[in-house]
Structure formats: structure tokens, C-alpha cells
Image (cartoon, rainbow, N blue to C red):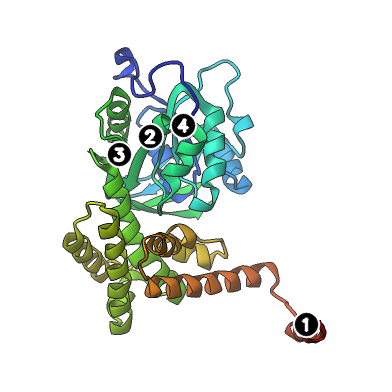
Amino acid sequence: MKAGGVSPHEWSNEEEDGRMRIVVVGAGAMGGSYGGLLALAGEEVSLLDARSEHVEAVRRDGLRVSGVFGEHVVRLPAAESPEGLEPSGGGRAELVIVFTDTNATREAARAADRLLAPEGCAITFQNGIGNVETLQEELGAERVLGGSSMCSALVEAPGHVVMTHRGPTSIGELDGRRTNRLQRVAAALERAGFEVHVKDDVNAQIWTKFIVNSAINALCATTGLRLGEVARLPEMDALQDRVLDEAFALVRARGVPVAEAEVRATIKRNCRLKFSRPSMLQHVESARRTEIDAINGALVRESRKLGLAAPYNEALTALLKGRERDAIRRRENPDLDYDAWEAEAAVEEEKRAEA
């Protein structure tokens, strides 16, 4: 565990009403929206994102934030690597907000370690489960807060993010305490216009969002359907119920306090009312790797550990991986010669038979 200069749960009371130095790691749709709105509210925000075209656009034209909070352009530092943000004379970040996809969580945690002040902390609003634990492994357990966002956003173009829905933002200490740093983070988010809920058991909120994502994202990403279309196709609606049954069986076995009936009803209602494109569908359509291993794939792995079967989630994970593989192949090798591939397969099979 990495040791800070002061107790990691306590920040100076003198700083409670002051603005915060914040770095957002993963400044895409959600990270860019949160970072931009925090900067507009007066926080000292910098962005770290691996996409060079996005970073270059922010540096050149500022970050454009559109959507439910209005239309804004904000100027703020942006870089592709921690070296571009490490202070030459100023202070390090008090808070790192991790908004990368789950495939980059460990890399994000190591970037946070370089950018945080000794007494600073990180918070994750990522999808899936396992992100908190990865941050704790890299930063130390007491330097990590838990979070969950029910907002949604998209990238309109490099340097332009759109927040399409304003939902609750839940945050909490993982040990349930109400600390100075937690209250400062909540105050910063509230100044930026977010609906902030400080939770004594933020882990339950993380798992609730995990269930929501498990029941929606992969169904849309595999079929190409939007939420409202899933709800209106009886076979897909029934499949969603089976996916939820397995998710609730897992949380019961783990003892996570999730309001099953309420969560199921909320998911069904949202699917009837909304026709949005979940982030996983956006990833497939742009031929990017998805977060399936941290969502439905994680549900399967965690269920197996407890001796539970999760065949619907297992099948959904396999199907989505196939769709993802096809999308990436079409982008990277659009002129693949299948005849040549078949010839290679025949040679390989002959060698296997001879062995």
C-alpha cells in the first residue's frame, strides 16, 4: 500500500470550500462531459486521453460540451500521457476521476499514481465490476473512492462531447465513512450541476449499475437494437428477464443489498421509454473493443466462483465477442481473402492429422 503524507481520509478543513485540482483520466464521452462541466464550475481540471485527435482538438479549439447542460466551450489542459500533465511548479492533483473503459483500468491507475498528490485520491465512475479493486491494488486501498454515474453521453466529434441524459451521480467512501474529502468531491460535483448522492454503501450502487449494464448493453450491442426496440420484441424482452434472473442470483449469493424488484422495474421502464444507444453498441459500431469482460463476462466468472450457473449471460458474452471480432476485422482487414484462409486451414489440418 502506498503511504500518503497525511491521513488519506482527511483533507484540511481550510480547503473544504476551495476549488479542487482534478485530472480526468479517460476524457471521452462521459469523462469529457464531467471534466468540462467541472471546469466550467471553476475547478482546476486537466484531461488525459489516449486519442491524439481528441486531445489535439481540445488544445486547438477548447472542449465543446453540449447536451442537457447547454452549449459550452471551455479551455483546459489536455494530454495523451501523464508526462504532458505532470506539474513543473504547481501542485499535483487532489482528485483523479477515472472514466476509461474497463480494459484500461490498470493503466489509468498507474497514471493516477503519477499525477496525484500524496494525500490525493481517485474515484471511478466506470462500468462493470473489478475497477475499484484494480485502483486499490495500484494506489492503496485508502486512496480510492467508489462512484457510479447514471448519466449518459456520446462523442459527437473530436473535441466535442454531448451529455444526453442527466441522472444521479453516487459517491462514497468504501468503508462507509463521511469524510472531509468525500464532502469536497460532492460539493465540486454539485457546483457543476450534477445530482449528487453520497452513499454509505456505495458498493451496492456500483453493483446496481452493473446489473443495469448487464441487462441492456450486450443485448443492444449484439443485435444492433436500441433500448426501445429490445423492449418491443417479445423474444428479446424475455431474454433480458433471464439475464436479470442470473444477475440477481449472483448478488443474493454475495450478500449485496440490491432492491431487486425496483431495479428490474426501472430497467423495464427505461427500455420502454428510451431509444438511446448504449456505450457498448457505440463501441461495436465504431469497431472498438467492448467492456463485455467486465460486465456479462464478469457476471459469469463471479457466478462460477460461487457454484452458480449463468448460461444466458455466458451465451450473450460469446455472441457479443463474435460481433466485436467481426467489427474489428472489417475495420483492420476489410479485404480479407477467405479462400486463402481456407487453404491455410487445410494445410494446418493435414499437419494436425499427421502428428
Q: Position of residue 25 (x, y in %)?
A: 50, 39
Up-down relation of residue 263 to residue 104 (above or below): below
Q: Position of residue 182 (x, y in %)?
A: 30, 29
Q: Which residue is mark 4?
A: 140
Q: Which residue is mark 2?
A: 38
Q: Quadrant of residue 42?
A: top left
Q: CA distance from mark 3 to mark 1?
A: 55 Å
Q: Which of marks 2 and 1 precedes in the sequence? A: 2
- Tag in front: 3 or 2: 3
Task: Label 1, secondary structure: give it.
Answer: helix
Q: Which residue is mark 1?
A: 352
x 43%, y 59%: residue? 298
Q: Is residue 277 visible?
A: no
Q: Tally the marks.
A: 4
- Tag in front: 2 or 4: 4
Q: CA distance from mark 3 to mark 2?
A: 16 Å
Q: Which of marks 3 and 4 precedes in the sequence? A: 4
Q: Which of marks 4 and 2 precedes in the sequence? A: 2
x 17%, y 60%: residue? 262
Q: Which residue is mark 3?
A: 171
- Binning the other alpha carbons within 10 Å of mark 2 as few (below 14), some (14 to 19) or many (20 upward) gives many
Q: CA distance from mark 4 to mark 1?
A: 49 Å
Q: Which of marks 1 and 3 precedes in the sequence? A: 3
The disc labelled 4 sits on which kind of residue?
Gly
Q: Which mark is residue 298?
A: none
